[in-house]
Image (cartoon, helix red, strand yellow):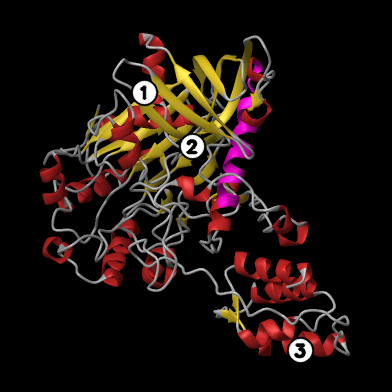
Amino acid sequence: MSPSIRGAVERALCSGYQLTPEAFELLGRFGDPAAAIESLLSSFETASPKPIAIEAAHLRPLLDRQGAPAQAAPGAAAPAPAPKAAAVPDAAGKPAAGSYSWPSRRRDATLRPPPAAAQSPSAAPARPPQARPTAVFGGDVTVISGSEDRRIGGTIDDFKQYFLDRYGRMESILRRRADLRDATSVSNLPHGERWQKVKAIGMVTSKRDFKDGTCTVELEDTQDSVRVSFKADDALKKKVTRLLKDEVVCVSGATKTGRTILANDIIWPDVSYRQRPAHPQEPTYAVLTSDVHIGSKMFMEENFRGFLKWLNCEEGDERSTCLAEQVKYLLIAGDLVDGVGIYPNQEEELSITDLHTQYEKAAEYLAMVPERIRIIVIPGNHDACRPTLPTPPIYREFAQPVYDLKNVVMLGDPATVNIEGTTFLLTHGRSLDDSIPSLPGCDFKTPQNAMVELLKSRHLAPIFGEKTPLAPESSDRLIIDPVPDIFHAGHIHVEGIASYRGIVVVNSGTWQAQTKFQLSAGIVPKPCIAPIIDLMSGKTIEMNFNFSGPAQAG
């Protein structure tokens, strides 16, 4: 296959389209196959419905406009059979029957680039353009990211590109630190007759603890790997325990061979201290919530109705009613409904067994929110959405009644929005299932502590291959950049608030009582508490609706 045809085919696959054998054969007759594919993909942007595959019928009009077909050079090899498109995972996150197996660990998708023959510019997947900020709600809210809906292929090369992008961008974030300007990469470590001090940036690929208290870690970059040893020093050992697989860090220490490092410190990308952002000139509040689980038998409907009545200033004492009058935003971090088929025998715990009806009911509840309050909704793992992170907005075909509400904007996970000068990072928090058990000092009773650790890692889901399925997009949208003023998640069903370097960290709990699964796992929800952010002062308030009386501000 010629490089030009290979590049055109790769471009089509990275955009989510396979070619039929007839289309592939026809592509070889173009003088510039890449230009033909680009023209075709541009036309697909406005097509409704979009085609599933590129067929010969799509290419023939372009070939006719081109004129006489280009002749193959004498002795040129016949076009190779059309490559098969990568299978898209099913709703459970598993490949379709007959497709390849997803890597069980990131080592199967190593950072090392493919052979030189496959690295020509035409063959490299095109990196999607960065989303342009979009003003909504009359300009009071700017959507920085979260409206993207990128197609994924799911091949090993797609995973390579994903981790290459993660490594490159995280390395750049580390090098912004004043104390790491002299850092080097793993493949550029010096070697000589004497020990030399080094600071090496790499991705954690493995970690091994020994009985004597020592530990070794393997770091790699795009070209090489190095073994890092740590002494059994208590303070250092605590840092080593904090290391997560697949995150990018810098270790400082000494090396003699360039193949091993004796380390004395670990440096994470981390966030710089945030100064209080520009703020409204009058009291303005944003309510943060998540995990409503409408449709579940455990949905605490009366409590949620009490919350809605409070927003309408129909319930509460004078203080809380005055607060409700100044609420201008409602941010919902996923699991608006309980979904269908999320886990075995879920139908036994559903009061509404149809997904469309669940969203119709959700729209009824959200319609009770005063129109002066702007609502932003992102998906959770119980919503009708792609099961991998990043996740595009909830599927419109299921949630059309919610989309029809004039004061609602639907975004993906993660989403970054600027609300009257304050930057919010919204994510459902699925990766907390992996991060909490892996981080010392973190548990499911205080999910906000694990969220602080994710800020230090500058990544929403560092660990690959565990419970959190990651989509191999060509750029890693789970990197925390820009740094937010407010970091909001849910998923754990336990409300909690923390502060880290000027950033307010909020896990917004739930409106669902304890499920059978949570009971078996020992997880005790902390429901019906609505954290509220004062955009003027940056302070947080907790409104408690977990009782039958009027709302109370905590």
Q: What element carries label 1?
A: helix
The amino acid type, in three-letter code, at marker 2 is His
For the residue marked with disc 3, what is the amino acid? Answer: Pro
Q: In this view, does 231 lie above or below 154?
A: above
Query: Residue 528 appears at what percent x and percent y?
Result: 21, 41
Q: Nearer the viewer, residue 449 or 530?
A: 449
Which is more toward the observer, 189 or 521? 189
Q: The magenta stretch spans which residues?
A: 160-178
Q: Mark 3 points at which residue?
A: 61
Classify 10 Å Cα crowding around label 3: few (below 14), some (14-19), many (20 and above): few
Image point 72% across, 53% down: which residue? 116
Point 72% across, 61% down: residue: 123
To which residue does mark 2 refer?
Answer: 459
For the N terminus, the image quarter is bottom right
Tag 1: amino acid: Thr
Tell us which disc is closer to us: 3 or 1: 1
Give whichever of discs 3 and 1 has the lower sequence position: 3
Residue under numbered circle 1: 241
